[in-house]
Image (spheres, rainbow, N blue to C red):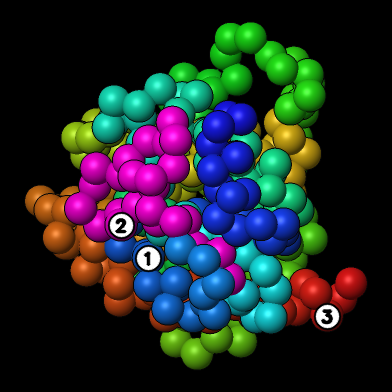
Amino acid sequence: MKDTLEYIESKIGNYQPEWGIILGTGLGRLVDEIEIDYVLEYADIPHFPLSTVESHKGRFIFGRLSAQKVVAMQGRFHFYEGYSMQQIILPVRVMKALGIQRLIVSNASGGLNPDYEVGDLMIVNDHINMLPNPLIGYNDNSLGPRFPDMSQPYDSHLLALAVEIAEKIDKLRFHLGCYVAVSGPSLETPAEYRYLRIIGGDAVGMSTVPEIIAARHASIPCFAVSIITDLGVEGKIKEVSINDIVAAANATEPQMTALIKELIHQFHLMQ
């Protein structure tokens, strides 16, 4: 990670973002709201993976959102792309080293809860990890403890504030729910949807949890939000393509952007 950090710092100097933001499938337009100071292409950063999914541009954006310094990943990495868990969580550790104090993660996901509809927003209050744990292997004690506590993976203060804000956003249907992380890249079968619902999932996707685990390992408070882009509910399951998922994410992205912007704004007013 040393070469990676040295390169980034050579481009941004002592710029210290307070918030890290990871943008999911079809959700990269939040960047349009950032007053950009620096843009770094993943392809230029030493030892950095590349986004291979069409809707993930592959850039680190440094700038100001709601008057606060942020670093946003416009494009993330997934296990199904063939990357190791260490590669997937590298950006979180880089952002920690750059000084972030909180992490916001977004994703597009399939709804498991029968109360959910396409276009709804789910504020994540817990998760179930069905991917390899990214902390397996040697533990660097300077990054975090061998056995990090996960009793509060999503920060209760950010959750409570987000609910207050979401209730005031016009035409936004939102829920609190549990996110299940699976490997993909194939979408789930009807039987798999039923199983994931039985074990406690409200939505399912192929990302987010590795980054959250790495962040909590490093004692970074986390907030995550899912846009429901398709349904895994009996009687509502239909064939979907990546274009359908991106289109559904794009449709709700303005409300998600409003939530994230106001969350950052209101949080700092409370400090």
Which amino acid does the dot numbered 3 rest on? Leu
Q: Earlier in the sequence, mark 1 or mark 2?
A: 1
Q: Where is the C terminus found, in terms of image quarters? A: bottom right
Residue 159 falls in which quadrant of the image?
A: bottom right
Tell me if I can see residue 153 in this picture.
Answer: no
Image height check: is 41 above or below 89?
below
Which x, y percent locates residue 111? 36, 53
Which x, y percent locates residue 82? 29, 25
Residue at screen point 30% across, 57% down: 57
Q: Where is the N terminus found, in terms of image quarters? A: top right
Tag 1 residue:
28
* Separation of residues labelled 3 and 2 (CA atoms): 32 Å
Tag 3 residue:
269
Residue at screen point 54% across, 43% down: 7
* Residue 3 horizontal side relative to residue 138, left or right: left
Q: Nearer the viewer, mark 3 or mark 2?
A: 2
Q: How many marks?
A: 3
- Farthest residue in the bottom direction? 170
Please give the range of residues in magenta.
40-63
Element type at mark 2: loop
Which amino acid does the dot numbered 1 rest on? Gly
* Separation of residues labelled 1 and 2 (CA atoms): 8 Å
Tell me if I can see residue 8 in this picture.
Answer: yes
Question: Is residue 57 located in the magenta-colored stretch of the structure?
Answer: yes
Which amino acid does the dot numbered 2 rest on? Lys
* Separation of residues labelled 1 and 3 (CA atoms): 26 Å
Q: Residues within 10 Å of mark 1 (few under 14, many from 20)?
A: many
- Farthest residue in the front direction? 10
Element type at mark 3: helix
Image height check: is 213 above or below 248?
above
